[in-house]
Image: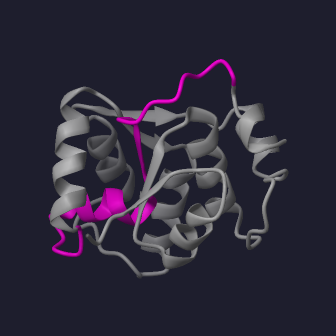
């Protein structure tokens, strides 16, 4: 699948943002690592209801909590439900198109399945991936999806 073959049924949306897992956590916890430009864009786009969260994100959050790498200060499932209930946020299901697309990315990418699903979700929805992951940001610069540095 080439860059032009991405989900012809979904129009390109400059204002649609897909939040990487750590960005959702930073947003919900008011973490200062979320940069002012990213925070402003998230607020602007969220007001229009155009913030997306991948279906892999709740799983990633559960893993981070179980490994004690993140403390949400409450039950994980309750926290995730609260985050997904925030105005402007929509959960993108892991449909067969995204699942298979994550295995057929038309560029070199590391094998982390969660990152591959995030990138495939960004490509399928034509959303801009908001992430501070330097590896993903570097891939976006030379590949077939848009990304915004969440730390700026």
Front position in the image: 108 or 89: 108
Up-down relation of residue 32 to residue 43 (above or below) = below
Quarter containing the N terminus: top right
Q: Position of residue 23 (x, y in %)?
A: 34, 61
At 41% across and 81% down in the image, what residue appears? 69
Up-down relation of residue 29 to residue 145 (above or below) = below
Up-down relation of residue 114 to residue 43 (above or below) = below
Is residue 86 visible from the viewing direction of this image? no
Q: Position of residue 41 (x, y in %)?
A: 23, 48
Up-down relation of residue 80 to residue 111 (above or below) = above
Residue 82 picture quarter? top left
Residue 115 picture quarter? bottom right
The answer to if 25 sits in the magenta stretch is yes
Is residue 70 visible from the viewing direction of this image? yes
Q: Find the residue positioned furthest to the top.
A: 9
At 40% across and 71% down in the image, what residue appears? 132
Q: Position of residue 135 (x, y in %)?
A: 57, 76
At 57% across and 62% down in the image, what residue appears? 140
Q: Position of residue 58 (x, y in %)?
A: 48, 52
Question: For this view, does 49 lie left or right of residue 146?
Answer: left
- In magenta, the rendered stretch is 8-34
Question: For this view, does 114 lie left or right of residue 35?
Answer: right
Front position in the image: 147 or 69: 147
């Amino acid at each position: 699948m080439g860059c032009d073959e991405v989900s012809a049924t979904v129009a390109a949306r400059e204002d649609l943002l897909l939040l990487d897992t750590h960005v959702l956590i930073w947003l919900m916890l008011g973490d200062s690592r979320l940069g002012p430009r990213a925070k402003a864009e998230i607020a602007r786009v969220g007001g229009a209801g155009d913030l997306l969260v991948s279906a892999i994100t709740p799983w990633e959050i559960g893993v981070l909590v179980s490994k004690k790498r993140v403390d949400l200060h409450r039950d994980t499932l309750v926290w995730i439900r609260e985050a997904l209930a925030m105005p402007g946020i929509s959960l993108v299901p892991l449909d067969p198109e995204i699942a298979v697309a994550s295995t057929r990315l038309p560029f070199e990418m590391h094998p982390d399945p969660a990152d591959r699903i995030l990138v495939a979700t960004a490509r399928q929805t034509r959303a801009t991936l908001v992430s501070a992951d330097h590896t993903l940001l570097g891939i976006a610069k030379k590949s077939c999806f848009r990304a915004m540095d969440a730390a700026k």
